[in-house]
Image (tube, rainbow, N blue to C red):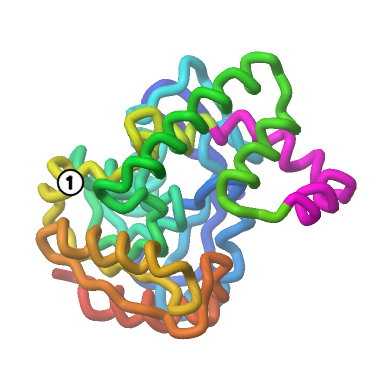
Amino acid sequence: MHKVTSRDGTPIAVESRGEGPALVYVGGAFNDRNSGAPLAELLAGSCTVHCYDRRGRGDSGDTQPYAVGREIEDLAAVIAESGGSAFVYGMSSGCALALEAAVRGVPIDGLVLFEPPYNPAGVGELMRESKEYATKLTALLAERRNGDAAELFMRTVGLPPEMIAQMRGGPMWAHLEALAPTLAYDSAVMCDSEGGCLPVERVSKITAPTLVLSGGASPEWMRTVAQQVADTVQNGRHQVLEGQTHDVDPRAVAPAVREFVRRHAGR
C-alpha cells in the first residue's frame, strides 16, 4: 500500500498489482480498496490495477468539508500517479463518480461500469424516495447515529429486516458503522437530493469508450438504466452478464474488462 496526495492535501491510500495498462477500481457504498482485490487478482496478468480507499475510508484521509469535486480530485490523483491516464472500473455508486470524473476532463482511457444505480427516468415515486433517503441520512449522521444510518441504507436498497438484524449482531457491523458517514458521499455523487436520476446533459458529453455491464438476474430496472447510460454517452455499449446480480462474481466481470482494455489500450 502507498499513498498519493489529492489536490486539497488529503492522503489517499492505494494498492496496486499486476502489469499492463493502468486500470483504477472505484468502489461503491461500504467499499474500500479491499473490495476490488478479487477482481484485481484476476486482471493482474493483463492490467495494472489500482484499488484505492475513497476519502473517509480505510487508510485515506477525510478533509472537510466534503464535496464531489474533491472526490474527483482524489481519483485524478490516483490516475496521475498511475501514469497520467487510466481505464476506470466503477462499481455501483462508484460508476457515478467515474462518470462525473470523465465529464470534468480527468484523463480516462475508457470506462467499465457495473450497474450504475440511478433511478429510471421519470419514475416519480423512486425520485421522491431518493430525496427522502438523502434527508433522513443527513439527519441520522448529524446525530452521530451511524448504525441507524447504515440500516437506513440497507433498507433503502431492499435488504430484508431479518438480514439487517443479523448483520447488526455480527462481527462486521462495527466496520460498517465506521464507514457509514461516507454514505453521505455516495448519496451526493448519486444526486439523491435531486431525485437520483442519470444527469443526461452532463453524461452526454463523455467521449471515452464506455462499457456498461448489468446482471441478467438483477432487477429489470437495473438493465434498463445500464442501457440508458450506454445510450447517453457518445461511445457506449451495454452488455448483460447472464446469471449475475448486483453482488457480481468477479470471475464473471474479468473477461469483459480484460477484452475491453485490450481493445482500447493505446488508442
Residue 178 lies in the magenta stretch: yes
Among the 4 quarters of the image, the one containing residue 179:
top right
Q: Is residue 70 above or below residue 230?
A: above
Q: Is residue 145 above or below residue 46?
A: above
Residue flagged by tag 1: what amino acid is it? Answer: Val
Q: Can residue 16 be seen from the camera position used here?
A: yes
The main secondary structure of the magenta stretch is helix
Residue 169 lies in the magenta stretch: yes
Give 194 or 248, whichever is nearer the viewer.
194
Q: Is residue 218 left or right of residue 143?
A: left
For the C terminus, give its image quadrant.
bottom left
Q: Is residue 234 above or below residue 65?
A: below
**Where in the figure is residue 95, as x and y percent of width and height?**
38, 52
Residue at point 36%, 34% (across, down): 191
Identify the residue position indicated by label 1 in the image: 200
Give 53 or 146, whichever is nearer the viewer.
146
What kind of element bears circle 1?
Answer: helix
Q: Residues within 10 Å of mark 1 (few under 14, many from 20)?
A: some
**Where in the figure is residue 45, as x and y percent of width and height?**
47, 80
**Where in the figure is residue 215, as x and y percent of width and height?**
45, 74
Residue at point 53%, 71% (across, down): 245
Residue at point 80%, 43% (across, down): 173
Residue segment shown in magenta = 161-183
* Number of disc labels: 1
Residue at point 66%, 32% (across, down): 149
Among the 4 quarters of the image, the one containing residue 89:
bottom left
